[in-house]
């Protein structure tokens, strides 16, 4: 069980998040993709902490905790914006929000 | 400036007192354990009608003369009477069939009020549930017939009044009969005395044949 | 005395004896660990399902006694076999699933509801040294796993594909989320004073006896008393019980997210609610009522796990007692009470605990923390009760 | 039977124990795939919740219990509920998945870039020597030490995150509030 396998797992998770963000047309699903990408980042932090030479430093753990807090705040604000956009253009399809298009 | 939350505490104290009270004095708990403790019904409570008979033989002592007044008067028409006929077809003063559909009967007691012969009264039995919907809820004559003693046991005062009335009728009838008999006897004596007097004065008048 | 010592360590001795028995047969070490874990899990779940069965009949009997009637006394002596009868009824009842319901989500909801309710039992210290899972972040584990119930409530609401269920589920989740905050803060207050998040350490910290006979439980300190009441109220809301059972409010929401459930699935929800209630009672006992500590020094001969389950029974009794007394809260009163009263009060308890600690935990500290907690209580309390001031009714016509 | 037992015991159990972390990791990847691919939005959101739970279990399996519990509490308790409520509130027309997410040619570009990124990442991961380090023994991350670190060395970031969360809370509430028509 080496670090590579864990990094591969988080890479795959990151790709799922990216594909979701790029392909899904519903704005909430884009946010789901972002959440998955952040989860993958957290997994990397903890993996590196677990395989680090000096685990007592707990830096990886600290980083992960703060990243979870920030991700929660981001999710809250993101969803508020989505609801506001939905209330404005009556549909949460990402392509319909193009009033600013030239 | 009352202490906020004191209302809740008062409420809790009330429920606690109720709960402990129910363990301390028993008459707080008024629930009746039904099958073991039966409810004490008031004396003139009624459920469904039944037929009263005197003496010991239900058929013979039956008071009902199938005059069918109750059948006509019954609002939901749940009484069905067929008059009994003897071999020669002459109507008898007795019902051959007397059915009451207690599923339809609304225990209004009108049949009891209109019955001239005090022969139908209200029973107090209420546990009459049954499994089949049609058959067993129509009580036939044999099921309806109950003795006068039973009537005395369920409605003592009313039964006593009824017996008193029946007794009074009987006495009046006997008195009337006796009076009639006496009058008839007196008339017969006068006729005999007159006949004797005429016999003494004139010969025997010719016998007249009365053609029916 | 020997008998009590025997009783005290009876459960762990029994387990050791059985494991040694198996070791005798050459069972590998790791398999022994697995077997003993399974035995511990089995007994914990068995005990709590037994408590659930007993509590479901005791609740009906206590509610009955409060209303001056007997409660179930037909099935078995004093009605104690009523849960068996209810169980058979629940199992044999037809399990309806609405045709247009979301089959998978509808089916999974009771399972997802039951999992956190049972997992949460792992960290409660049932007796001296009798903690199924020694986690040093036990309290955090409790709330982390407890968050799963909200997902289950949503799945139940959404899976039934019926408007009442979705509304009931959203109300239930809104209530659970807004009461989770005071719940966590009042638990953190105790963790701050005890200096650790592990339930066993918290119970150890409450083991001292002041002046020889007053137990060192946190509920007997001013901030602890307020935090305990807040935790208790939030626990009632978290397990959707009594004054906060709006989601299952029969009057307007039929049965909230449980409308479309019948038969065994409904029994699982019913079981999950009760096991959840006992678990949160257990946590309240661990945090505030001194877990398995004896109330008086000479009473420590009584086995420790008797104290724990005795206190849990007492707290569960008070929850039933509250249910018999208080009417149901309206949704906006419920929310205002959470955000505008409970949250500020939990911050006040937080400050009072800090003041109590840094003022040396002496009589001065007691007075200081009592003031820090009492003043906001009266201000906030009167601010709210003034609005709903209840004057005695004036009957216009009967006077 | 006995020698079978002996052979069974001789297996390198502690090494195998290390691979156990892949079990929740596998569940997480499957759930994440479900969250991305499922057409029914509610099923996607529930799969996302399952992947959050599995990620929390992976953290616990890797020894970072505190982060695992925080992940469970924050993501499963709050973020998943937020996403599910957002789905309910915005009532998107394709709730029942009328239109497949990969309809038309739009997604081809997304999938291609994703695949390219994945290949690049895996190339780096499997070529770098540092990544081959074997798993050391289970480090202990006691909550007390994390608490001290948070309160002593990381107190400024902690307060900053506190301010950030409050701002986000109020911002989200103000944004999503129905603006009362005058």
Image (tube, coloured by chain):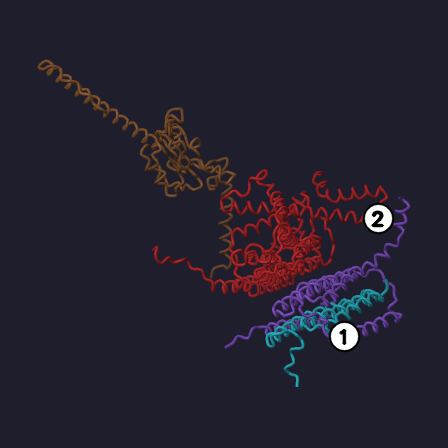
Chain colours: A cyan, B brown, C red, D purple
Residue highlighted by disc 1: D108
Residue C369: % across, % down: 59, 61
Q: Quadrant of residue A60?
A: bottom right
Q: Which mark is residue C271?
A: none
C7 lies above or below A19: above
Q: CA distance from mark 1 to mark 2?
A: 53 Å
CB atoms of marks 1 and 2 within 8 Å = no
Q: Is residue B162 found left or right of C209 in the rendered image?
A: left
C60 lies above or below B36: below
Residue B137: % across, % down: 47, 38
- One can see residue C227 in this view: yes
Q: Chain of mark 2?
A: C
Q: Quadrant of residue A75?
A: bottom right
> Mark 1 Cα within 10 Å, few/some/many (few <14, many 20+)?
some
Specify the quadrant that holds the N terminus of chain C.
Answer: top right
Q: Nearer the viewer, residue C282 or A3?
A: A3
| Residue in the picture at 68% in, 43% down | C301
Q: Chain of mark 1?
A: D
Q: Is residue A90 found left or right of D103 in the rendered image?
A: left
Residue B129: % across, % down: 49, 38
Q: Secondary structure under badge 1?
A: helix
- One can see residue C210 in this view: no
Q: Nearer the viewer, residue C342 or C378?
A: C342
Q: Secondary structure under badge 2?
A: helix
Tags 1 and 2 on a common chain: no
Q: Nearer the viewer, residue C291 or D44?
A: D44
Residue highlighted by disc 2: C29
């Amino acid at each position: 069980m080496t670090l590579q396998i864990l990094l591969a797992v988080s890479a795959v998770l990151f790709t799922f998040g990216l594909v979701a963000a790029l392909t899904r047309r519903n704005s909430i699903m884009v946010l789901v993709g972002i959440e998955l990408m952040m989860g993958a980042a957290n997994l990397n932090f903890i993996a590196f902490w677990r395989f680090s030479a000096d685990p007592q430093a707990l830096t990886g753990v600290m980083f992960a905790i703060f990243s979870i807090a920030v991700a929660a705040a981001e999710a809250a604000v993101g969803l508020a914006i989505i609801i506001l956009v939905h209330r404005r253009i009556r549909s949460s399809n990402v392509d319909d929000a193009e009033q600013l298009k030239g | 400036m009352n202490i906020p939350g004191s209302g809740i505490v008062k409420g809790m104290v009330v429920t606690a007192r109720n709960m402990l009270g129910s363990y301390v004095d028993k008459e707080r708990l008024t629930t009746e354990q039904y099958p073991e403790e039966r409810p004490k019904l008031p004396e003139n409570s009624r459920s469904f009608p039944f037929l009263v008979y005197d003496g010991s033989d239900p058929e013979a002592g039956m008071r009902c003369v199938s005059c069918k007044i109750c059948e006509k008067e019954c609002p939901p028409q749940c009484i069905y009477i067929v008059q009994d006929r003897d071999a020669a077809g002459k109507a008898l003063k007795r019902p051959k069939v007397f059915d009451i559909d207690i599923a339809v009967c609304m225990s209004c007691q009108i049949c009891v009020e209109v019955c001239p012969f005090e022969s139908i009264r209200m029973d107090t039995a209420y546990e009459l549930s049954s499994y089949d919907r049609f058959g067993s809820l129509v009580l036939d004559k044999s099921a309806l017939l109950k003795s006068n003693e039973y009537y005395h046991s369920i409605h003592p005062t009313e039964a006593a009044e009824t017996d008193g009335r029946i007794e009074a009728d009987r006495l009046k009838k006997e008195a009337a009969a006796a009076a009639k008999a006496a009058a008839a006897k007196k008339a017969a004596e006068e006729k005999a005395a007159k006949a004797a007097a005429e016999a003494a004065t004139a010969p025997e008048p010719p016998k007249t044949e009365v053609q029916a | 005395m020997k008998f009590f010592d025997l009783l005290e360590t009876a459960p762990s001795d029994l387990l050791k004896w059985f494991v040694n028995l198996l070791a005798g047969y050459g069972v590998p070490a790791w398999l022994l660990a697995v077997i003993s874990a399974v035995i511990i899990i089995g007994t914990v779940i068995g005990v709590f399902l037994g408590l659930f069965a007993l509590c479901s009949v005791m609740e009906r009997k206590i509610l009955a006694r409060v209303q001056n009637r007997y409660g179930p006394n037909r099935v078995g002596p004093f009605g104690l076999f009523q849960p068996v009868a209810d169980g058979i009824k629940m199992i044999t009842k037809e399990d309806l699933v609405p045709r247009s319901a979301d089959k998978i989500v509808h089916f999974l909801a009771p399972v997802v509801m039951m999992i956190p309710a049972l997992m949460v039992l792992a960290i409660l210290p049932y007796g001296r040294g009798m903690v199924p899972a020694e986690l040093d972040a036990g309290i955090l584990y409790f709330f982390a796993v407890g968050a799963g119930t909200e997902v289950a409530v949503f799945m139940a609401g959404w899976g039934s594909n019926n408007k009442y269920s979705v509304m009931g589920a959203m109300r239930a989740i809104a209530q659970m989320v807004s009461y989770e905050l005071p719940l966590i803060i009042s638990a953190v207050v105790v963790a701050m004073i005890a200096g650790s998040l592990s339930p066993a350490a918290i119970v150890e910290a409450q083991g001292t006896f002041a002046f020889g006979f007053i137990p060192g439980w946190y509920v007997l300190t001013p901030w602890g008393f307020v935090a305990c009441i807040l935790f208790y109220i939030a626990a009632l809301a978290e397990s959707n019980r009594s004054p906060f059972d709006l989601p299952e409010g029969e009057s307007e929401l039929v049965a909230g997210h449980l409308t479309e459930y019948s038969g065994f699935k409904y029994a699982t929800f019913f079981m999950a609610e009760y096991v959840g209630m006992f678990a949160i009672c257990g946590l309240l006992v661990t945090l505030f009522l001194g877990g398995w500590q004896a109330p008086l020094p000479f009473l420590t001969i009584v086995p420790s796990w008797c104290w724990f389950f005795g206190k849990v029974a007492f707290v569960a009794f008070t929850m039933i007692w509250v249910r018999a007394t208080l009417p149901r809260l309206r949704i906006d009163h419920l929310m205002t009470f959470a955000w505008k009263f409970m949250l500020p009060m939990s911050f006040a308890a937080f400050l009072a605990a800090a003041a109590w600690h840094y003022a040396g935990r002496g009589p001065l500290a007691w007075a200081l923390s009592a003031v820090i907690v009492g003043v906001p209580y009266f201000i906030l309390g009167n601010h709210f009760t003034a609005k709903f001031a209840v004057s005695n009714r004036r009957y216009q016509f009967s006077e | 039977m006995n020698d079978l037992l002996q052979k069974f015991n001789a297996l390198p159990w502690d090494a195998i124990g290390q691979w156990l972390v892949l079990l929740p990791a596998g569940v997480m990847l499957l759930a994440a795939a479900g969250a991305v691919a499922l057409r029914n939005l509610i099923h996607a959101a529930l799969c996302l919740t399952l992947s959050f739970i599995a990620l929390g279990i992976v953290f616990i399996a890797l020894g970072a219990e505190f982060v695992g519990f925080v992940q469970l509490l924050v993501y499963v308790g709050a973020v998943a509920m937020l996403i599910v409520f957002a789905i309910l509130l915005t009532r998107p027309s394709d709730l029942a998945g009328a239109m497949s997410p990969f309809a038309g040619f739009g997604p081809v570009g997304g999938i291609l870039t994703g695949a390219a990124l994945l290949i690049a990442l895996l190339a780096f991961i499997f070529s770098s020597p540092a990544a081959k380090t074997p798993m050391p023994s289970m480090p202990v991350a006691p909550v007390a030490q994390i608490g001290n670190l948070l309160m002593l060395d990381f107190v400024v970031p902690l307060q900053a995150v506190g301010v950030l969360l409050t701002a986000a809370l109020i911002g989200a509430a103000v944004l999503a509030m129905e603006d009362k028509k005058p």
